[in-house]
């Protein structure tokens, strides 16, 4: 679990020369979260957001380092259910690591290679996928990561299926 948390902290988004996408629908933020436009002003890379998110999901943005107010190095989009009870999808974003010449496939053994709008991605199913968690829910999903135009993205979910995760990932702009 600590390794997963550390991986989550390492993720960012960098998209150069693409304006921040204006959402066609209103984004429902929770917990007085920082907004996407505020994030864009505080990072040195472009923010990429999914266009295909159900209307009843809410968004909370976590920034890192936690104590930094002006220079945010990475952030995470936390999409929650409408009751703000369950984390459905988390999307970490950061600049592409400088040592990314090493294949992602080498870093994530046993990962399934997937296509995300022409970008090579890798999906890893949770080891306990299909089992029932302590809340009585079936564990599904996994970790999905890819590099898109110089940005490293990692999406994680234990409540949303692999196919739904890919659908959301393919809508990132």
Image: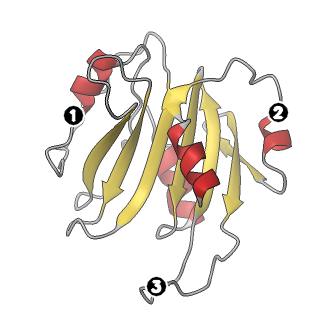
**SS at mark 3?**
loop
Residue 53 visible in the picture: no
Ranked by sequence position, the earlier of labels 2 and 3 is 2
Residue at 33% across, 69% down? 86
Q: Quadrant of residue 63?
A: top left
Residue at the disc numbered 2: 103
Residue at 60% across, 20% down? 150
Is 100 drawn above or below residue 27 in the view shown? above
Give how far apart the Cα atoms at labels 3 and 1 are: 31 Å
Residue 59 visible in the picture: yes
Q: Quadrant of the N terminus?
A: bottom right
Residue at 49% across, 34% down? 93
Q: Quadrant of residue 123?
A: bottom right
Residue at the disc numbered 3: 137
> Which mark is on residue 35?
1
Give how far apart the Cα atoms at labels 2 and 3 are: 34 Å
Q: Does residue 59 appear left or right of residue 8 in this picture?
A: left
Mark 1, residues whose alpha carbon is within 10 Å: few (<14), some, or many (≥20)?
some
Ranked by sequence position, the earlier of labels 3 and 1 is 1
């Amino acid at each position: 679990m600590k390794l997963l948390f550390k991986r989550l902290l390492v993720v960012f988004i960098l998209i150069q020369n693409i304006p921040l996408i204006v959402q066609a629908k209103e984004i429902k933020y929770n917990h007085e979260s920082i907004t996407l436009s505020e994030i864009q002003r505080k990072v040195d890379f472009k923010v990429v957001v999914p266009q295909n998110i159900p209307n009843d999901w809410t968004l909370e943005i976590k920034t890192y380092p936690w104590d930094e107010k002006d220079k945010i190095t990475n952030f995470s989009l936390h999409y929650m259910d409408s009751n703000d009870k369950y984390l459905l999808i988390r999307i970490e974003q950061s600049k592409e690591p400088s040592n990314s010449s090493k294949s992602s496939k080498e870093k994530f053994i046993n990962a399934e290679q997937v296509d995300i709008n022409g970008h090579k991605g890798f999906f890893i199913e949770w080891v306990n996928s299909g089992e029932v968690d302590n809340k009585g829910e079936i564990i599904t999903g996994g970790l999905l990561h890819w590099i898109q135009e110089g940005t490293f993205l990692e999406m994680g979910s234990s409540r949303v299926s692999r196919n739904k995760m890919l659908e959301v990932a393919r809508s990132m702009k």
